[in-house]
Image: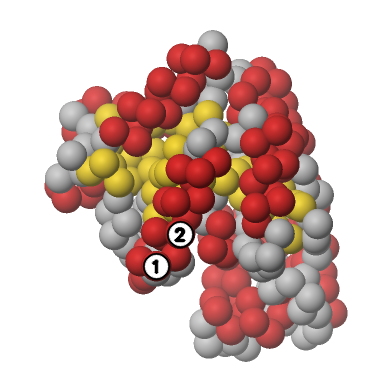
């Protein structure tokens, strides 16, 4: 039985509801999925409710953004307590930072002549926490860029004229938050790190902070790279996880739901790690 441990919904920057994602996963024959929305837990309860209806196991999770030596590092948290006060308080602060960042990016785009406004970006985001994909979609609507990729490449990607950095946790802080609410922390998609050179140094630092796994299998990793990460995880005593990083059919065609899946035994290993840490 295979499982997809990296799935996003419209509670962050995905395009499908928890019910839609859950129904699709069940129809595909997946044994379980992990809901790992960016910096929010709001989609967990709807997903668990949908999971009961569709007879599909839902692993409560989250994907936290952090920064290490100038590069973005994403930390996945599995089996988290979605009602944990410390984590919810920190996520509320992160959401406020996202709002302020979006206001500043919209202002920069307006100064560049883009007829884009914050209300429209919020409308596109809907119930989801504001992110650059929502801004990119609003930019496409103006006709000034043809695709969301073009919006990132020319205007809102790192170092581009309308880019605004946002406050970031350190990886150790992200791991602490996940562990504090009973979760198991995993380094997400290492193949997307901007600098592969210090990867082992980073992993050693994360192990000291309490990381338990490495996302070896991801659409950005070819077979050779996934094999390397599997061996690296084994050598470091980490759980090798994997998932599709699904955001919906309208985004990232290379990351279809279930495209990257791992055996159910990975969930069992995560649960065992959680039990040992309790």
Q: Tell me where residue 245 appears, x and y as whole percent.
A: 43, 55
Q: CA distance from mark 1 to mark 2?
A: 6 Å
Q: How is the image coloured?
A: secondary structure
Could one spot residue 18 in this view of the protein?
Answer: no
130 vs 195: above or below? above
Tell me the quarter of the picture where residue 211 sits.
top right
Residue appearing at x 35%, y 66% in the figure: 223
Mark 2 neighbour density, 10 Å: few (under 14) some (14–19) many (20 or more) = some
- Which residue is identified by label 1? 224
Q: Tell me where residue 232 appears, x and y as whole percent.
A: 50, 50
Q: Quadrant of the C terminus?
A: top right
Question: In the image, is 145 to the left or to the right of 103?
Answer: left
Question: In the image, is 190 to the left or to the right of 224?
Answer: right
**Helix, strand or loop at mark 2:** helix
Mark 1 neighbour density, 10 Å: few (under 14) some (14–19) many (20 or more) = few
85 vs 88: above or below? above
49 or 80: nearer the eye?
80
Are the residues at dot 1 and dot 2 in contact (C-beta closer than 8 Å)? Answer: yes
Q: Tell me where residue 32 appears, x and y as whole percent.
A: 27, 36
41 or 179: nearer the eye?
179
Residue appearing at x 71%, y 51% in the figure: 201
**Helix, strand or loop at mark 1:** helix
Q: Residue furthest top?
A: 278
- Which residue is identified by label 2? 228
Tell me the quarter of the picture where residue 247 sits.
bottom left
Could one spot residue 216 in this view of the protein?
Answer: yes
């Amino acid at each position: 039985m295979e499982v997809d441990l990296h799935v996003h919904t419209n509670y962050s920057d995905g395009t499908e509801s928890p019910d839609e994602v859950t129904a699709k996963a069940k129809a595909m024959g997946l044994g379980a999925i992990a809901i790992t929305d960016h910096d929010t837990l709001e989609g967990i309860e709807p997903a668990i409710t949908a999971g009961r209806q569709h007879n599909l196991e839902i692993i409560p999770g989250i994907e936290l953004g952090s920064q290490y030596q100038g590069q973005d590092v994403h930390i996945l948290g599995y089996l988290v307590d979605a009602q944990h006060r410390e984590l919810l308080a920190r996520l509320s602060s992160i959401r406020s930072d996202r709002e302020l960042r979006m206001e500043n990016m919209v202002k920069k785009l307006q100064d560049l002549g883009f007829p884009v406004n914050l209300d429209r970006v919020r409308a596109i985001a809907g119930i989801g926490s504001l992110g650059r994909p929502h801004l990119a979609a609003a930019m496409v609507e103006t006709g000034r860029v043809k695709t969301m990729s073009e919006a990132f490449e020319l205007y809102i990607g790192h170092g581009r004229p309308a880019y605004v950095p946002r406050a970031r946790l350190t990886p150790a802080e992200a791991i602490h938050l996940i562990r504090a609410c009973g979760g198991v922390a995993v380094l997400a998609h290492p193949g997307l790190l901007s600098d592969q050179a210090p990867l082992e140094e980073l992993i050693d630092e994360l192990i000291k902070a309490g990381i338990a796994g490495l996302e070896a299998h991801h659409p950005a990793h070819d077979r050779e790279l996934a094999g390397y990460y599997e061996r690296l995880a084994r050598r470091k005593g980490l759980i090798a996880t994997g998932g599709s990083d699904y955001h919906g059919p309208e985004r990232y065609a290379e990351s279809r739901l279930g495209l990257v899946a791992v055996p159910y035994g990975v969930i069992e290993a995560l649960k065992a790690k959680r039990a040992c840490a309790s």
